[in-house]
Image (tube, rainbow, N blue to C red):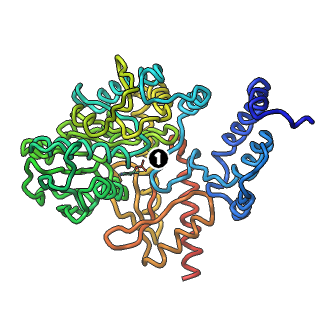
Amino acid sequence: MSDKKSVQQKMFTEISDKTLFQQAEKFGFEYLEKAFDRNVFPSEKALENLSIFEEKMPVEIGNATQILNQLNEVGSPATVSQVGGRYFGFVNGSIVPTGLAAKILSIFWDQNSAMQVISPISSKLELVVQNWLIELFGLPSKTVAGFVSGTSMANFCGLSAARYRILKNHDWDITEKGLFEAPKIRIVTGKGAHSSVLKCISMLGLGKDNIEWVEADEQGRIIADDMPELDSKTILILQAGNVNSGAFDNFEAICEPARAAGAWIHIDGAFGLWAGATEQLKNLTKGLEFAHSYAVDAHKTLNTPYDSGIVLCQDEEAMIASLHITGPYIIIGKERDGMYYTPEMSRRARIIELWATLKYLGKKGIDEMVYGLHLRAKQFAEQLSSIEGFAVCNDIVFNQVIVQCASDDLTNQVISEIQNERVCWVGGSTWKGKKVIRISVCSWATTEEDVNLSVNSFSNALNKAIGKI
Ligand SMILES: *Cc1c(COP(=O)(O)O)cnc(C)c1O
């Protein structure tokens, strides 16, 4: 008879009883304690155990405690410990503890950031953080920010505003008339552009075949002298932080003349834009204020929780016109309705963690943390260069290191040996037509000792790989 309770009654009990949440918190703390020392990638056994999740859609109402236990026992060991200090794959990033704590609190709030009337706190924090970002990156005060899931979406928003503005300047309202008969937009970008930029170009109907590619130098930067003549129908897409080498396009040389020619400049600064918020590395982004729109992730270099991307745009009208929706039930807020600056309407309140992280770190903390990533990347490169068999391929300007072995086969084998060792995690890429190991230092938690341990694992992996090839 005990299970005759309705799901509503059960859920009220779970709220008042609280043990469910205390259990989640306990599991979370246990996870964090181990996250810095454990094997970075899940063991084979943990991966095999994931098959436990393959069950039919349940019919009956479940048992909350069991559900949480299953996640803790089977799910947790199958996570990748990117929170710790030895995850160097892709460009990811850990979590600043205050951001994590703020997220935990905000989960209870479950706010929807669409409009001020739906969440006054989110609206306020979005406005505050918008101003902080303007100050941190040295942008004009008219700049607006949209808080989206990541840089892929931020690139989409920036390029969508660009498409709107360029066509509007040529008497064509894209939102009404569409693209079919529109004046042709030119797209200029460097050969080192990130794949997400290309995806946005295709999603926006601009067509990848229309790209005018500019040669990149040996670090992956656009060669400024090779830029074609730009005009008022051009979108120029630049990069702060090449995804392999970490190199920055030369904004100082490129942006001012490009703006003067009437082009719209968008900067993909997913992880690199944060250099502009530091004292010690801001030279890398000199001239960025001449661009029109920017995409940057908070979940990478700034170490906020996922998912947190930001689009910044100096042209508020273009941004709103290209993204906004209207409807009879929409209540326009006095201060800020976040949905005007994003493609989504309902959105989780990722601003809460972002605000908490920025408030906690302050300018000094950002400087220390981001410069720290750079120092650890330099340490990595120096130590690897001193091992025979590894060659560092890039200048370490920011947080990225790319390394090569004697042949592509050997590099591939070394990558899989490193991954098997599980001391750290790195992935591969290609650079100048050759296979490379790609190291991205993105976690505040990476210590000198983490780099030592990882370099040691690289060295073991090389010896094992040489024996097998
Ligand atoms: C990571 C990255 C992206 C994509 O960002 P997401 O947050 O994963 O969508 C775009 N450009 C560059 C340079 C990146 O490093």
> Across the whole image, how many numbered discs are drawn on residues?
1
* Amino acid found under the numbered disc labelled 1: Cys
Give the farthest residue toward the right.
1
Q: Is residue 243 left or right of residue 225?
A: right
**Figure check: 82 above or below 52:** above
Front position in the image: 156 or 390: 156
**Figure check: 12 above or below 285:** above
Q: Residues within 10 Å of mark 1 (few under 14, many from 20)?
A: many
Q: To which quarter of the image does residue 416 belong?
A: bottom right
Q: To which quarter of the image does residue 229 belong?
A: bottom left
Q: Is residue 179 left or right of residue 323?
A: left
Residue 18 at x, y percent in the picture:
76, 27
Which residue is denoted by mark 1 in the rendering?
442
Label 1: which secondary element: loop
Q: What residue is shown at x 44% (from left), y 38% (from top)?
A: 302
Q: To which quarter of the image does residue 203 belong?
A: bottom left
Q: What residue is shown at x 13% (from left), y 44% (from top)?
A: 172
Image quarter (top left, top right, bottom left or bottom right) of the C terminus = bottom right
Q: What residue is shown at x 38% (from left), y 29% (from top)?
A: 338
Front position in the image: 368 or 245: 245
Residue 382 at x, y percent in the picture:
42, 57
**Residue 371 visible to an observer of this rendering:** no
Front position in the image: 393 or 264: 264
Give the farthest residue toward the front.
328
The residue carrying mark 1 has its beta carbon less than 8 Å from ligand 1: no
Give the farthest residue toward the bottom.
469
**Figure check: 157 above or below 348:** below
